[in-house]
Each structure stands twice: as structure tokens, then as C-alpha cells.
Image (cartoon, helix red, strand yellow):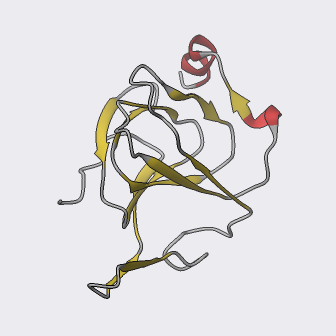
Amino acid sequence: MGKPDIKVKNSGICEIQRIDDLPDGSLFIAEAEKSVPFKIKRVYFINKLANERSIRGRHAHRKLEQIIFCVNGSFTLYLDDGKSTQEILMKEPSLGIRLGPMLWHEMKNFSYDCVILVLASDYFDENDYIRNYEQFLKMTE
């Protein structure tokens, strides 16, 4: 799989090291302030996305930066910077997408075996979330 061409603002590609040790599996290495462009303060993952109508995300952040990976299976990542939109098929575990500040994002079309891993630049803060799309659009004008 080639790297996606990122068209929206406040985003980019984060490629982590992949070491294939077949038949004993593959190792993926993410290092803070090296392959990940920030100190990692929070790590979380999402699984059990068997409902084909599930949609995750549906928000933007004021300041938080994240890198999102699909470590198993696949899903579609929808990005919106207020002016441009883009959909990216996520299925390569070594390629993450940077979700920078003021970038609306949604995840959908999950494969049954999908596992999403997210590395975040800060601790959880509800005040950093923008959960209303119309408010987000006004903030990006």
C-alpha cells in the first residue's frame, strides 16, 4: 500500500518502523519525539467494532495532537479542515495519520477485526473537544 496523499490542513503521515520477523510475526515501533512528533501522554485503542453502522470520532480538538493507526483490519478515516475534506482507507499498521488541532475527524466502515490505536500529545480534557460540527465550521472561518 502506498502512502496516502494528504490534502487537508493540520494533518500528515506518521510512518513507524516495521521489522518483519517471519514466521514469528512483525514488530512495529513508535518512538516519542522521533517517529511520533510529540511526547506521548496518552495511548488508547478501540476494538469490537462489529456493528457496520458504527461511527467513531465526530469531533475536533482545539489543541490536542494525535496519531491514529489501524493495527488490525481496516476502516475509513474522514478528515475535514473546514475547507477541504478527505477520506483515507486505513489498513497498513505502520502508517498513522496525524490528527492535528482543528481537524474534524470520523471513523467508519470498520472491518470485523478492526483495532484502532491512538497516540495523544496530552491527557484527556473534555474542554479541548469541539463536538458540534456547525461550531467547528464557524471556528475555522
Q: Residue furthest front?
A: 23
- In this view, which residue lies farthest toward the top? 134
Q: Residue furthest left?
A: 1
| Rendered position, 57 above or below 31 | above
Q: Image quarter for residue 96?
A: bottom left
Q: Which residue is found at the position 67% from the left and 26% from the top?
A: 130
Left or right? Give the position of 26 relative to 120. left
Q: Position of residue 55 (x, y in %)?
A: 48, 25
**Quadrant of residue 3 in the image?**
bottom left
Q: Against 134, is 140 above or below?
A: below
State the quadrant of the N terminus.
Answer: bottom left
Disc tally is 0
- Relative vertical location of residue 88 with respect to residue 139 in this rendering, above or below: below
Nearer to me, 4 or 23: 23
In the depicted view, which residue is nearer to us: 64 or 54? Answer: 54
Residue at horizontal 79 percent and vertical 53 percent from the top: 123
- x, y percent for residue 121: 68, 58
Indicate the position of residue 53 as horizontal and vertical percent values: 42, 19
Specify whether 139 is left or right of 69: right
Residue 94 at x, y percent in the picture: 36, 67
Front one among 20 and 18? 20
